[in-house]
């Protein structure tokens, strides 16, 4: 039979490194990356109706209403591209309601990766984070400085990356984490995300290769 493509969810507190790892995962496995944060930021910067609704929630560091985000995700994930290449869902589900909406349409990942990072590190990572609006690449002033002066000059800071907002985003994450994890307990892999990004990535790769092998076996039955 045909080997089904990988279906991966990645979760973790703000600045735990989801975006950074997704960049690497996409390069290696060719999955379709669906990041609700990135999708929402794109809506905000193009000034769409969704963007205008989402903006105040995002700026204040709170969650955007479920119906907006869920509609966005279900459209992307049921697209031909995601079906064919597999998907990597980043930043969703973020509440029990969101996890339940996926369960209702029988959408389950093969693996649920949780990046685990202590609070002090998260705050430092948010404060030092910068985005390149041209390439979409994520930098950190200390940990991952831009390669050239030209890039440095165009870097932007996210409006929700202040110390106060990071703390409230972290609070929201903690309030929801357990309920979501319980939905995916059987496929949950917790990874120590405080190590260098290459080390974290190596562990993710080994998990994904295991999953891929298991799927190949199933296809031979
Ligand atoms: P979203 O964009 O998803 O933000 P987040 O979950 O807070 O995650 P971040 O993007 O802050 O961090 P990350 O884990 O990707 O870390 P990164 O790789 O950048 O969501 C933003 C907002 O959108 C939400 O607050 C909400 O309003 C709304 N939203 C999104 N999804 C929603 C949903 N489902 N429902 C409702 N609302 C939703 O890394 C961080 C920094 O650390 C970088 O500078 C990086 O260079 C550095 N770094 C990364 N890894 C390492 C490492 N291993 N060692 C050292 N430094 C590292």
Image (cartoon, rainbow, N blue to C red):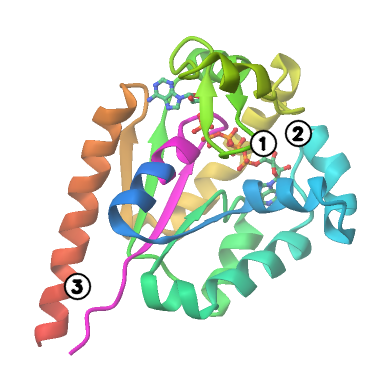
Task: Reply yes or no: does residue 21 show up in magenta.
Answer: yes
Disc 1: which residue: 172
Going from the N terminus, do you reach mark 2 or mark 1 first? 2
- Marks 1 and 3 in Cβ contact (< 8 Å): no
Q: Nearer the viewer, mark 2 or mark 1?
A: 2
Ligand 1 lies under 8 Å from the Cβ of mark 3: no
What residue span does the magenta drawing correspond to? Answer: 1-22
Q: Secondary structure at mark 3?
A: helix
Q: Residues within 10 Å of mark 1 (few under 14, many from 20)?
A: some
- The structure residue drawn at horizontal position 67% and vertical position 23%, both measured from the top left corner, is 154
Q: Horizontal and vertical percent for residue 30?
A: 35, 60
Give how far across and how far down residue 172 sits, in percent: 67, 36
Q: Nearer the viewer, residue 153 or 108?
A: 153
Name the residue: 69% across, 23% down: 157
Above or below for 141 versus 132: above
Residue at the image point whose x is 65% and y is 35% from the top: 133
Per the image, label 1 sits on a secondary structure element best described as helix
**Left/right of residue 148 with respect to residue 188 in the rendered view:** right
């Amino acid at each position: 039979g045909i080997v089904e493509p990988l279906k991966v969810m990645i979760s973790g507190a703000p600045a735990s490194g989801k975006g950074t790892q997704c960049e690497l995962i996409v390069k290696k496995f060719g999955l379709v990356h669906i990041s609700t944060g990135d999708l929402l930021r794109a809506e905000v910067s193009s000034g769409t109706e969704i963007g205008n609704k989402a903006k105040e929630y995002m700026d204040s560091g709170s969650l955007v209403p479920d119906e907006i985000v869920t509609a966005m995700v279900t459209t992307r994930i049921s697209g031909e591209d995601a079906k064919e290449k597999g998907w990597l869902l980043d930043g969703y589900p973020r509440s029990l309601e969101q996890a339940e909406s996926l369960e209702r349409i029988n959408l389950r990942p093969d693996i649920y990766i949780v990046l685990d990072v202590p609070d002090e590190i998260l705050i430092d990572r948010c404060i030092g984070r910068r985005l390149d609006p041209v390439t979409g690449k994520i930098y950190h002033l200390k940990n991952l400085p831009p390669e050239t002066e030209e890039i440095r000059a165009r870097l932007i800071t996210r409006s929700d990356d202040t110390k106060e907002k990071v703390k409230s985003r972290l609070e929201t994450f903690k309030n929801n984490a357990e309920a979501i994890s319980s939905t995916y307990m059987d496929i949950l892999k917790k990874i120590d995300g405080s190590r260098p990004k290459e080390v974290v990535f190596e562990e993710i790769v080994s998990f994904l290769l295991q999953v891929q092998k298991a799927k190949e076996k199933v296809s031979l039955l």
